[in-house]
Amino acid sequence: MPPIRKLTLAVNASKDGAAELARELAGIAAKAGVTVREIAAQPVAAGALAGQDACCVIGGDGTLLGVAREAARAQVPLIGVNRGSLGFLTTFSAEEARAHFGELLGGAYRLAHRAMLECGPAGGPRDLALNDVLIKAEENSRLVRLEVDADGELVTEYTCDGLILSTPTGSTAYNLSAGGPIMHPAAEVIAMTPICPHTLSNRSIIFRQDVKLRIINRSPDSAMLVALDGQRHPAIKRHDAVEVSISKLRLPLVQAENYSHFSVVRTKLKWSGALVDRRG
């Protein structure tokens, strides 16, 4: 892969050891002749990553989500270094980053291009989500009745606590906690998972990559809240129809050359199964 010559460090200083690790990695980069600048991880201003070869995010998965939209718009690859808990997206540990950062900057990495959702009010401005779009009642104690249309065809109407519309990347996040499926990140589909539906027959639905979804609030007394990767969409009003589809933009994500998605899943979710050589 191309070497990285211009690097931004996006650091979540509230994470234990993040600032110290950023200084170490900046030193490694400087010795390699890389131009380095540091920004606060959240919020990332529009245009903050323009002209950069890569952005190294030091924090947890939530920190990376806060940078992902701008990285996708600028098509700047993200290097996730985990100083949080699970680390599905921030796949490099601090030890791995220290040991291999110079090699990575020299081009010893691979790029994955992760699908993102775009969401907004009907006919209104769109924003991006790497993990999921959450649609729920504005008041936590209220049920909401949501009609779902796919390409203009009625799918169903849910009476539920809310809906999660997830990318494959986000399938191991809120979607998984709500009983939704785990999807391989290359699948480029949308999973729709109801939260506590008031029926035993409703389960997750998987939609193809070019589907156009519309969600309509059919509860006159319950206003909707719409959140993209945990951040409320400011342009969606209380009773707007919400449109969701897969964006044309992809997030470039830096991975180690020997990265294995299922190895990460086994480790993070504590699945059984050892990696053994079955060739003989």
Image (spheres, rainbow, N blue to C red):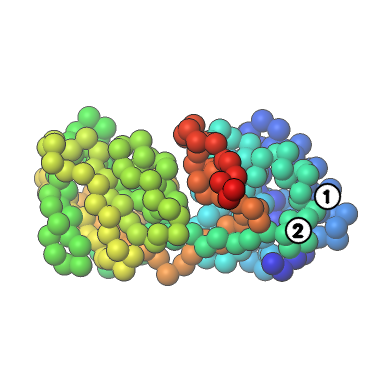
Residue 113: x and y in percent read: 52, 62
**Residue 93 appearing in the image:** yes
Give the number of the disc on residue 239: none
Residue 241: x and y in percent read: 21, 58
Mark 1 lies on residue: 28
Residue located 57% across and 66% down the image: 75
How far is the residue under mark 2 from the one under mark 1?
Answer: 9 Å
**Label 2 sits on what residue type?**
Leu
Q: Quadrant of residue 198?
A: top left
Q: In which quarter of the image is residue 45?
A: bottom right
Density class for disc 1 (Cα within 10 Å; few <14, some 14-19, many ≥20) is: some
Q: In which quarter of the image is the N terminus?
A: bottom right
Residue 187: x and y in percent read: 40, 59
> Is the C-beta separation of discs 2 and 1 under 8 Å?
yes
Point out the residue furthest to the front here: 280
Mark 2 lies on residue: 105
**Residue 45 appearing in the image:** no
Residue located 27% across and 55% down the image: 206
Residue located 66% across and 56% down the image: 257
* 143 lies left or right of 280: left
SS for tag 1?
A: helix
Density class for disc 2 (Cα within 10 Å; few <14, some 14-19, many ≥20) is: many
